[in-house]
Each structure stands twice: as C-alpha cells, then as structure tokens.
Amino acid sequence: MSTIRSSNPFGKPASGGPVQRDRCFLQGVAVRAAILVAAFSLAMLPNGCSVKEGAKSPGTHVAAGNGAIGTPAPEFALQDLDGKTVHIADFSGKVVILDFWATWCPPCRKELPDFIAMQSKYGDKGFTVVGLSVDAGGAHDVRTYAQENKVNFNYPILIANEQTANAYGGVVGIPTTFVIDRKGYIVKRFVGYTPASEFEETIRPLLQAS
C-alpha cells in the first residue's frame, strides 16, 4: 500500500453502494470519524492513498441523498483553469462524466488518458468529461502537472471545494466519478480506478437516449 502525503480534502462517505476500487483517501486530521472511515477503507483496499498532512478541514454537513443515484446532479459554480466560473447547468443536455481527482493520486492519473480518449471519441455526440480537481494548489498544481507530464486536457478542469464535495454526498476516496444523463440525473457512481470499458458501457445507452 502506498501512502501519498498531500493536501485538500473533504468529508465523509456517501450512503449506498458505489463501485469501489483502488483509490486515494481524503481525510481531515481534525475529524476523528472521517479518519476512522478512511483507515478502515485502506485496510480493505490495496493501493489506497492516505492524505495525512496539510488537509483542509473536511466537510461534515452532508445532506441525506446528495449525490445519490437517481437524484439531480447538485448545482455548483466553480472556476476553470483560466478563472472562468462554470456551472453544472452549462452541461445541460449532455451526458457527463464528473470526476473528482487530484494530480498526486496515482489511480486518478491512470484514468486521465482514458478520459481524454473518451472525450475525443464521444465529444461530438453530446458528451463531456468534467474534471473536478481537489489539489490544494488549485489551477497551479494542475497546470504544472500537465506541463511536466505532457497531458493535453481536451475537457474542462474545474477547481473543486468543500461545498462541492458535500453537495455530492461527501468525498473521502478519489477518484470518485459520477455519470450524469442528459436530463441532469445521476445514473452511476464509481469510487476508485475504473476501466474505460465500464465507463463506455454506462454512457453508450445514455448517448442513444433522446
């Protein structure tokens, strides 16, 4: 099991049974319950990543049902890498993969080429990936990572905050990824690294739906 020491993040796990695989954990040192949840999850998963230093105070006020399958995707207003404010409503009518991730998280980084490929493949069919970075350094960290690793993002990258994580049910492990249909409803939630084939199996019927 690797331990990644980094920053940012947020809350307690959402209810329900999302698909769970390799993931990095976001835990606030100030909240004992969140630490216990993360520690238990790390014991259950190989290759989990524990965030132990520099974390912001995690979100603890999570309304029941937020981020649940079958519910509308919660609204947000977040800045992209250029400082422009973007709303979830800006993607109305599209099938969306909404991905909470960070540059320091190996499973998150592993998914990036797949997301870039899916954006190229399905972008003209009413589909978009939206990355929600939880990096403490915000846009600077993402830009630096992209430059150093020659990652050419072809989809929006927004800078997430505690409120966003809370709105989506609380985010402890990343990547945490939501699939949203054209009507703006959450249809699936994945926690941990997920193969591109599973994402594609989920989005294809949604893209065909009117």
Image (cartoon, grey):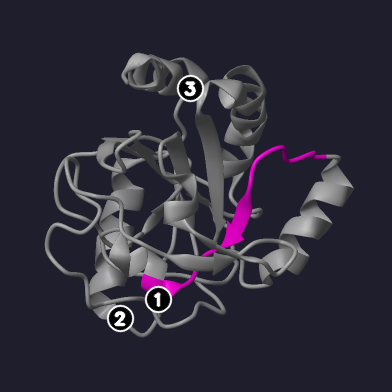
Q: Residue at x 21, y 70 (%)?
A: 62
Q: Is the magenta region chiefly helix, strand or loop?
A: loop
Specify which label sits upstream in the sequence, 3 or 2: 2
SS assignment at label 3:
loop
SS assignment at label 2:
loop
- Residue assigned mark 1: 28
Q: Callout 2, which amino acid?
A: Val
**Does residue 25 lie above or below 201 as drawn?**
below
Residue 188 image point, x, y percent: 28, 34
Q: What's drawn in magenta, residue-wise?
A: 151-163
Q: Residue at x 46, y 70 (%)?
A: 9
- Check residue 31 in the rendering and tell me which mark sits there, or answer none: 2
Q: Callout 1, which amino acid?
A: Gly
Q: Residue at x 41, y 83 (%)?
A: 57
Measured Cα–Cα span from mark 3 to mark 2: 32 Å
**Does residue 107 lie above or below 59 as drawn?**
above
> Can residue 57 be found in the magenta stretch?
no
- Check residue 195 in the rendering and tell me which mark sits there, or answer none: 3
Q: Quadrant of residue 168?
A: bottom left
Q: Are marks 2 and 1 in contact (CB under 8 Å)?
A: yes
Q: Quadrant of residue 144?
A: bottom right
Measured Cα–Cα span from mark 1 to mark 3: 29 Å
Residue 143 image point, x, y percent: 79, 57
> Image quadrant for the C terminus?
top left
